[in-house]
Image (cartoon, grey):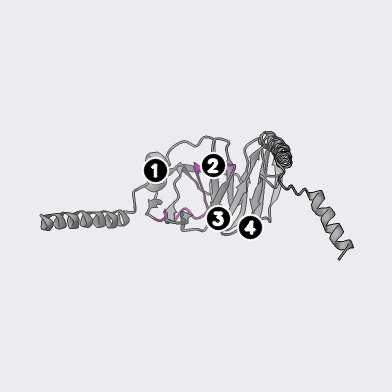
Amino acid sequence: MNRRFALAVAAVALLAVSAGCLGYVTGGGEVANETLDAEPNEPYDFETERDAEFDLTADGTYRVVYNVSEREELRLYEGTVYAGDQPLEFEAFRYQYADGEIINGSEFRARGGEVDRTPDETWVRFADDMDEGKLAFSGSGSPRRFTFLAYVEGSHAVTLPPGFSTDVPLVGHVSPRSHEVETVGDRDRITWESVSGSFVVQSYRETDLLIFGGIVVIGSIVAIVGTVKFRRQLEELRDRRRQMGLGVYDDEDVDDETDRDDEFP
């Protein structure tokens, strides 16, 4: 019985190890053409002159356009604290040639490009005739706290949804701090001349300030009422102690005793 159980455990362990190795060898799962060919919620702005331009939406998604000129490949990954690097997941893949022609993910593959996913990253590799183009895709990312790695060096821009801002320091934050904010229509755009490593944009909806202010006011009122109630209960306790003949030392009594001690050493 024990021998059969040990053999069963060994077989299960062998299958688990084999599955893990197989998953790594096969790249952790291919990105489906249906995912790459999905339609973005808004058309991509390929006219940008920046190396990376992000467009955030209030529903928690982003669109990004990268200048990938003179690049052979692009490694896309997310760093995690406990699990290490993880492949970046995205959809609605588009590539624009230097002449302006735009193709989707399946056409990109058919023309020699590659989109491969491993357990650690997603690789985009360009064909020989794709040396002066731009790459775009969409993904999930909240404008309230948008953190992203700089996969290409150079100028970056992040356009917030209408009604969002980073002006108030307590609820708004931008890093690196070497940025500028410009208003484009009814939207704020954060720009950096150069970004390496990563960047963070923490924004808020302007109507959130009313809610935040209301919470602060209510909290202050509760604190004041609580303090007054505590002092009242403390005075009632002192009165009861006096009525019971127990010693009560008020702050004034202690001060008087201290003064007398100073006068008569």
Q: Residue furthest bottom?
A: 265
Determine which residue is flagged by label 4: 194
The amino acid sitting under disc 4 is Ser
**Front one among 140 and 183:** 140
Q: Do callouts 2 and 1 mark residues in contact (Cβ within 8 Å)?
A: no
Helix, strand or loop at disc 1? Answer: helix
| Residue mark closest to the camera, 2 vs 1 | 2
Determine which residue is flagged by label 3: 150
- Left/right placement of residue 122 relative to residue 225 reads left
Q: CA distance from mark 1 to mark 4?
A: 32 Å
Q: CA distance from mark 2 to mark 3?
A: 15 Å
Asked if residue 218 is positioned above or below residue 26 in the image, the reply reads: above
| Mark 3 surroundings: few (<14), some (14-19) or many (≥20) residues within 10 A | some
| Residue mark closest to the camera, 1 vs 4 | 4
**Front one among 254 and 41:** 254
Q: Do callouts 2 and 3 mark residues in contact (Cβ within 8 Å)?
A: no
Image quadrant where one finds the C terminus = bottom right
The amino acid sitting under disc 3 is Ala
- Residue 129, given in percent of the width and then of the height, sits at 45, 54
The residue that appears at 50% across and 37% down in the rendered structure is 40
Q: Which mark is residue 166?
A: none
Q: Do callouts 3 and 4 mark residues in contact (Cβ within 8 Å)?
A: no
Q: CA distance from mark 3 to mark 1?
A: 26 Å
Q: Which mark is residue 62?
A: 2
Q: Quadrant of residue 246?
A: top right
| Residue mark closest to the camera, 3 vs 1 | 3
- Residue 28, given in percent of the width and then of the height, sits at 34, 52
Helix, strand or loop at disc 2? Answer: strand
| Label 3 or label 4, whichever comes before in sequence order | 3
| Label 2 or label 3, whichever comes before in sequence order | 2
| Label 2 or label 1, whichever comes before in sequence order | 2
